[in-house]
Image: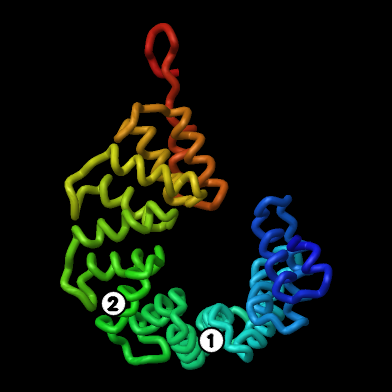
Amino acid sequence: MLRVAAEGGFAIAQNSYGLVLDFGNGVEQNYIEAARWYRRAAMNGVPRAMTNIGLMYEDGLGVDQDYVAATAWFERAVEKNDAAGQVNLGRMLDRGMAGEVDYDRAVELYEMASEQGNLFGLNNLGLMYELGRGVEQNFEKAASLYMQAADQGLPLGKYNLALSYISGEGVKPDVARAIELYKEAANQGHILSQYNLGVIYVEGEIVERDYSEGFRWTKMAADQQNPNAQNNMGYLLENGFGVQENLDSAIEWFELAANQGNELAIEALQRINSAPVADDKSGKAK
């Protein structure tokens, strides 16, 4: 039915069908077709479709990667007051992805999105206040914005608020609350929260050391292709921390991390490969 409506020229249906193809919801994932339908909907005036085709250009999905084209589509979405377009254009300007950095306009765009209740707008505006980009640095304001995003369920907001509680910037230091927030975000699939929890439990500096917990959270992040977590998996398996020692599995994780350019994993593989090998019978090194 959705495809029929899209082919019949209904612009909202065209954008919705693009989403179905983009994420493979009930159909085979097809970025090329998704981009085509987003473009048709955008040309028919759907603001969110303008943002969606912009994201395809940014990521190079279904179209050649083109930051300038992405920015142009985000601009068109902003003209239609699309909150997601405001956030994404702000991000492009914040990072200088398609030209010069423009912190002032990025802040304006994040404020516009925040006023519409966009959680990424709140989080990103918080980051601008934390870093003093386009606004006077204000840790209290940053933490307040992170809290607003976190309270409404945004994993990234929870992650940034957790960092604030650990550092004590803008809020009273509270490690227990930080751990709670990390766990909430991690259970929502936030990779850096999973990774940080792994490090926290393995290091045992701000909580009691627990290698088993460290291994569990590290593996979650590693399974999502985080190279630092993959390297740490190698370390834990090589040394038997929180898991039975297994050099073969450790090497596999080190290789995954090394293939993504992780220097520590590369060094670990070099160390392992250069280690002396024991004789099977005598136990003497060869």
Instruction: Point out the tag, 2 or 1, that comes first from the N-terminus.
Output: 1
- Identify the residue at image location x=42%, y=55%: 188
- Identify the residue at image location x=32%, y=58%: 182
- Residue 78 location, quadrant: bottom right
Q: Can you name the residue that lies furthest to the right here?
A: 8
- Identify the residue at image location x=27%, y=81%: 139
Q: Alpha carbon of mark 2 to alpha carbon of mark 1: how far?
A: 24 Å
Nearer to me, 222 or 46: 46
In the image, 270: left or right of 26?
left
Nearer to me, 260 or 143: 143
Q: Can you name the residue that lies furthest to the top here?
A: 281
Tell me the colour scheme of the image: rainbow
- Whether 219 is drawn above or below 238: the answer is below
In the image, 70: left or right of 190?
right
Identify the element where label 2 is drawn.
Answer: helix
Front label number (2 vs 1) = 2
Q: Can you name the residue that lies furthest to the front here?
A: 1
- Screen quadrant of the C terminus: top left
Label 2–label 1 contact, CB within 8 A: no
Does residue 68 appear anywhere in the picture? no
- Whether 189 is drawn above or below 18: the answer is above
- Whether 144 is drawn above or below 250: the answer is below
Q: Check disc 1 and give the amino acid type.
A: Val
Q: Check disc 2 and give the amino acid type.
A: Ala
Q: Which residue is mark 1?
A: 101
- Residue 11 location, quadrant: bottom right
Instruction: Please state the horizontal and vertical placement of residue 250, each as a whole percent of the image.
Output: 44, 34
Instruction: Please state the horizontal and vertical placement of residue 112, each as a whole percent of the image.
Output: 48, 89
- Residue 131 location, quadrant: bottom left
Does residue 8 appear anywhere in the picture? yes
Q: Which residue is mark 2?
A: 143
